[in-house]
C-alpha cells in the first residue's frame, strides 16, 4: 500500500486524538485569538440597551436542552448579566420541556453575583408550559392566560414587576435562545401577529436557516453559536458592565483550533485522494 | 359520527383561529382566548399520551425480549426513577419540582445536563472523522461545496488580524447573506406553500390521516 493510501485509511482514533488535543490545549493555554463583532450580535446588544432601566421587561425564552447548553448557556448568562447590571427587568419562560431547567440553572449561576436582584421585582421566572403556538399566541392576549403563576407558584397578580405587564404591548423585547425551530413560531405568532420585537440566540449549526428572517427584519438581531455568545460577552465588557469570566470567549479558542484541525484534515484527505488517484492511473498506464 | 365530529371540530376551530388572526377584536379574540386555553390543556394531555406510547413500546420490547431489550429496560427504569423523583420533589416543594436543592434539581444538574452535553460533544469527533473521509472533491458539485465550506469556515475562525482574513471574513458574511440566504429563502417559501396547502386540506376535511 502506497503512502497516500495509508493516509486515506488513517485510523479514526488518530483523528479523535487530534480533535481532543485541539479542544483541550487552548483551555490550558488560552491563545486569545482576535474576534470581530458582527452586526447581528451588535443589533441584539443595542436592542437590549434601548430598553429603559426599570421599564418594560425583556422576555428571554430558554427553548433549549442541555445538549446545546455549551453554545446557548453563555448567551443566557451574558443577557442576564447585561440586564441585572443595568437594572433592566427580565421575564424568563420555556416552551421546551427541558428549557425550564436551563433557565433555573442559568439564574442559579448568575444570581450570586447580584445579591440585590429579587424574584418578582427584578425578574420573573414563569417556568415551562406545553403547547408552543398556543402559549406564544396567548402571551399576545394576556400572559396570565398561559402562566397564572410564576414557576414557584406565586400568582402573577401579586408580583410587583408584573403589575403593568399584561401582553406583548408591555414587553420591550423577546430574545429566544433556541436549539430547535421554535424561533419560527415566535416569528409567525409574536412578530407577524402582534408586532413584537424579536432577537434570537441559536446554535451555530442552525444559524444558517435563520438568515432570511434576519434580512427581512423579523429578527432584530441574532447571536449565532458560541461566537455570537462571545461577541455579546465582549460587547458588555467593552461597556464596562462586567469583569466576570467570559466563558464563551475562552471556548472560542478551542472551537477555532478544532475548526482549523478539521479544515486541515479535509485538505489532507483531498490531497491523498488525488495523489492516490494519479498513482493508480500511472500504475494502470504502465501495465 | 366518530369521523364527522372531529372533522367539524377541526373546521370550526381552524376557521375561528384564522378569522381571529386577521380580526383581533371582540368577539373573535375572546373565542381565540378560550381555544388557546383549551389548546394548552390538550397539549398537557398530549404529553401524557406520549409517555403512555413510549412506555408501551418499550415494555413490549422487554416482554418479548426483542433485540436491544436491555436498552428498553434501562429507559423504563430511569423513566420511572426520574418520574418518581419529580413527583416527590413537586410534593416537597409545593408544585415546583426544579427548586434548587430538590432531588429532581440534583438529578437534572448532575445527570441530565452532563450526559446530554457529553452526547452532543461526541459529535465533534465524528464530524471530524466523517469530514476527513467523505468531504472529497469527486465531482463539480462536491468541489463547489468543499470550496464554500473551506472559505466560510476560515472566514468564521478568527486566527489573526490581517487583510487576507478580513477579506475571508467579509466574503463569508456575503456568502451567508446572499447565495446561502437565497437558497434557504427558496426552500422556506416552498415549505410555507406546502404548509398552507396542508392546513387548508386539514381545515376543509380533505386530509384525514391525522384521524387514523
Image (tube, rainbow, N blue to C red):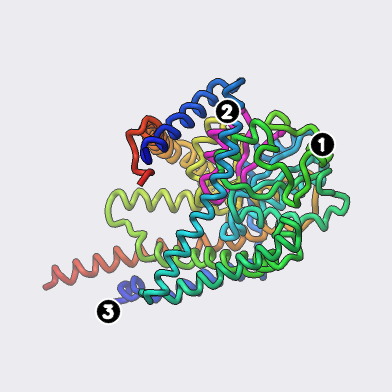
Q: Is residue B123 visible?
A: yes
Give coordinates of residue A139: x percent, y percent: 65, 35
Picture layout, residue A115 above or below residue A156: below
Mark 3, secondary structure of its residue: loop
- Residue A185 magenta: yes
Which residue occupies 73% across, 31% down? A170
Judge the density around disc 2: few (<14), some (14-19), many (≥20) Cα neighbours within 10 Å: some
Looking at the picture, tell me which residue is in the foreground, A57 or A127.
A127
Q: Quadrant of residue B197?
A: top left
Residue ID at (75%, 54%): A107
Q: Residue at x 65, y 31 (%)?
A: A141
The span picked out in magenta is A171-200
Whether marks 3 and 1 lie on the same chain: yes
Front position in the image: A163 or B206: B206
Location of the C terminus of chain A by quadrant is bottom left
Question: Magenta stretch containing residue B108, yes or no?
Answer: no
Query: Which numbered dot is residue A53?
Result: 1
Left or right of A133 in this view: B61: left
Asked whether the beta carbons under mark 3 and mark 1 sit within 8 Å of each other, the answer is: no
Between label 1 and label 2, give the one nearer the viewer.
2
In the depicted structure, whether residue B58 falls above or below residue B21: below
Q: CA distance from mark 3 to mark 1?
A: 69 Å
- The image shows residue B192 at horizontal and vertical percentages of 41, 34
Label 1 environment density (alpha carbons within 10 Å; few <14, some 14–19, many ≥20): some
- From the image, tell me which residue sits under label 2: B31
Chain on which label 3 sits: A
Amino acid at each position: 500500500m502506497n503512502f497516500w493510501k495509508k493516509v486515506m485509511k488513517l485510523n479514526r482514533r488518530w483523528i479523535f486524538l487530534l480533535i481532543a488535543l485541539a479542544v483541550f490545549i487552548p483551555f490550558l493555554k488560552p491563545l486569545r485569538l482576535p474576534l470581530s463583532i458582527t452586526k447581528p450580535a451588535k443589533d441584539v446588544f443595542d436592542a437590549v440597551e434601548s430598553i429603559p432601566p426599570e421599564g418594560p421587561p425583556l422576555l428571554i425564552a430558554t427553548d433549549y436542552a442541555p445538549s446545546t447548553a455549551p453554545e446557548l448557556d453563555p448567551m443566557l448568562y451574558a443577557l442576564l448579566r447585561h440586564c441585572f447590571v443595568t437594572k433592566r427587568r427580565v421575564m424568563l419562560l420555556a416552551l421546551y420541556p427541558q428549557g425550564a431547567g436551563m433557565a433555573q440553572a442559568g439564574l442559579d449561576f448568575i444570581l450570586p453575583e447580584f445579591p440585590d436582584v429579587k424574584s418578582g421585582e427584578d425578574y420573573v421566572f414563569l417556568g415551562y408550559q406545553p403547547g408552543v403556538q398556543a402559549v406564544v399566541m396567548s402571551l399576545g392576549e394576556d400572559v396570565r392566560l398561559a402562566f397564572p403563576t410564576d414557576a414557584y407558584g406565586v400568582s402573577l397578580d401579586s408580583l410587583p414587576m408584573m403589575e403593568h405587564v399584561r401582553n406583548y404591548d408591555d414587553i420591550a423585547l423577546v430574545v429566544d435562545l433556541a436549539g430547535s425551530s421554535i424561533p419560527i413560531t415566535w416569528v409567525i405568532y409574536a412578530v407577524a401577529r402582534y408586532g413584537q420585537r424579536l432577537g434570537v440566540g441559536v446554535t451555530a449549526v442552525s444559524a444558517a436557516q435563520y438568515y432570511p428572517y434576519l434580512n427581512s427584519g423579523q429578527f432584530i438581531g441574532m447571536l449565532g453559536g458560541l461566537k455570537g455568545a462571545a461577541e455579546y460577552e465582549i460587547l458588555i465588557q467593552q461597556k464596562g458592565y462586567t469583569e466576570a469570566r467570559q466563558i464563551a470567549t475562552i471556548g472560542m479558542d478551542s472551537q477555532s483550533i478544532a475548526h482549523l484541525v478539521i479544515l486541515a484534515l479535509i485538505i489532507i484527505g483531498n490531497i491523498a485522494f488525488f495523489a492516490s488517484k494519479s498513482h493508480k492511473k500511472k500504475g494502470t498506464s504502465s501495465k | 359520527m366518530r369521523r364527522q365530529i372531529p372533522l367539524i371540530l377541526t373546521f370550526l376551530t381552524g376557521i375561528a383561529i384564522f378569522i381571529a388572526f386577521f380580526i383581533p377584536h371582540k368577539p373573535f379574540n375572546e373565542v381565540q382566548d378560550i381555544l388557546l386555553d383549551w389548546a394548552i390543556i390538550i397539549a398537557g394531555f398530549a404529553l401524557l399520551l406520549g409517555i403512555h406510547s413510549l412506555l408501551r413500546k418499550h415494555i413490549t420490547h422487554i416482554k418479548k425480549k426483542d433485540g436491544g431489550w436491555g436498552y428498553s429496560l434501562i429507559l423504563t427504569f430511569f423513566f420511572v426513577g426520574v418520574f418518581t423523583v419529580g413527583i416527590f420533589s413537586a410534593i416537597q416543594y409545593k408544585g415546583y419540582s426544579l427548586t434548587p436543592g430538590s432531588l429532581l434539581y440534583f438529578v437534572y444538574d448532575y445527570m441530565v445536563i452532563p450526559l446530554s452535553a457529553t452526547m452532543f460533544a461526541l459529535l465533534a469527533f465524528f464530524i471530524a472523522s466523517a469530514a476527513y473521509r467523505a468531504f472529497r472533491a469527486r465531482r463539480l458539485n462536491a468541489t463547489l461545496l468543499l470550496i464554500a465550506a473551506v472559505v466560510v469556515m476560515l472566514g468564521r475562525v478568527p486566527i489573526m488580524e490581517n487583510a487576507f482574513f478580513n477579506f475571508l471574513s467579509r466574503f463569508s458574511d456575503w456568502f451567508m447573506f446572499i447565495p446561502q440566504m437565497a437558497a434557504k429563502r427558496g426552500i422556506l417559501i416552498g415549505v410555507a406553500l406546502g404548509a398552507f396547502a396542508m392546513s387548508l386540506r386539514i381545515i376543509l376535511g380533505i386530509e384525514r390521516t391525522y384521524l387514523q
